[in-house]
């Protein structure tokens, strides 16, 4: 990889995704806690919310792995560039980071669709 700094420039964007995902995770945890504390417990709703929590946790793990891969890739590429070698394994680590970030984004997309579906079910059950 000729430009070793490219993986490092992606890290702040993924950091923002991690921040927003952690906010979603905290809010969902609080909502689950509130549902459990209610007098009339809706077991199905709590199970759906727990699945959502697991999905958000998976997205966080994928995003963390992506950041780690980009940091390692930038470090390895920088070392290879300073040693002036032609083989650069940083590109392979970057590809793993990109795949991990995409998996995290897919998990967040699935979470979003399911969250809307759960809210619709909640609304229809109240009526």
Image (cartoon, rainbow, N blue to C red):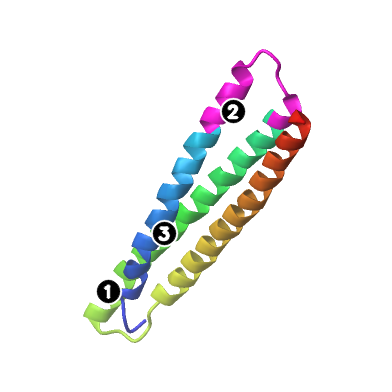
For this orientation, the residue located farthest to the left is 82
Which of the marked residues, 1 or 3, is nearer the chain's N terminus?
Answer: 3
Disc 3 element? helix
Q: Residue 4: which quarter of the image?
A: bottom left
Quadrant of image for the N terminus: bottom left
Name the residue rendered at 75%, 38% in the picture.
121
Q: Eyeballing the image, is 49 above or below 91?
A: above
Q: Position of residue 99 (x, y in %)?
A: 54, 66
Kindly identify which residue carries mark 3: 14
The structure residue drawn at horizontal position 45% and vertical position 42%, both measured from the top left corner, is 23
Q: Residues within 10 Å of mark 1 (few under 14, many from 20)?
A: some
Q: Are marks 1 and 3 in contact (CB under 8 Å)?
A: no
16 left or right, relative to 116: left
What's the CA distance linking mark 2 and mark 1?
45 Å
Residue 56 on the magenta span:
no
Q: CA distance from mark 3 to mark 2?
A: 26 Å
Residue, disc 2? 32
């Amino acid at each position: 990889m000729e430009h070793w700094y490219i993986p490092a420039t992606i890290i702040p964007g993924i950091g923002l995704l991690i921040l927003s995902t952690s906010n979603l995770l905290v809010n969902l945890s609080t909502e689950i806690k509130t549902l459990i504390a209610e007098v009339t417990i809706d077991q199905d709703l709590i199970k759906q919310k727990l699945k959502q929590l697991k999905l958000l946790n998976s997205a966080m793990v994928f995003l963390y792995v992506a950041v780690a891969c980009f940091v390692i890739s930038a470090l390895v590429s920088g070392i290879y560039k300073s040693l002036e070698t032609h083989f650069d394994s940083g590109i392979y680590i970057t590809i793993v980071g990109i795949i991990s970030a995409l998996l995290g984004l897919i998990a967040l997309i699935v979470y979003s669709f399911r969250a809307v579906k759960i809210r619709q079910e909640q609304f229809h059950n109240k009526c």
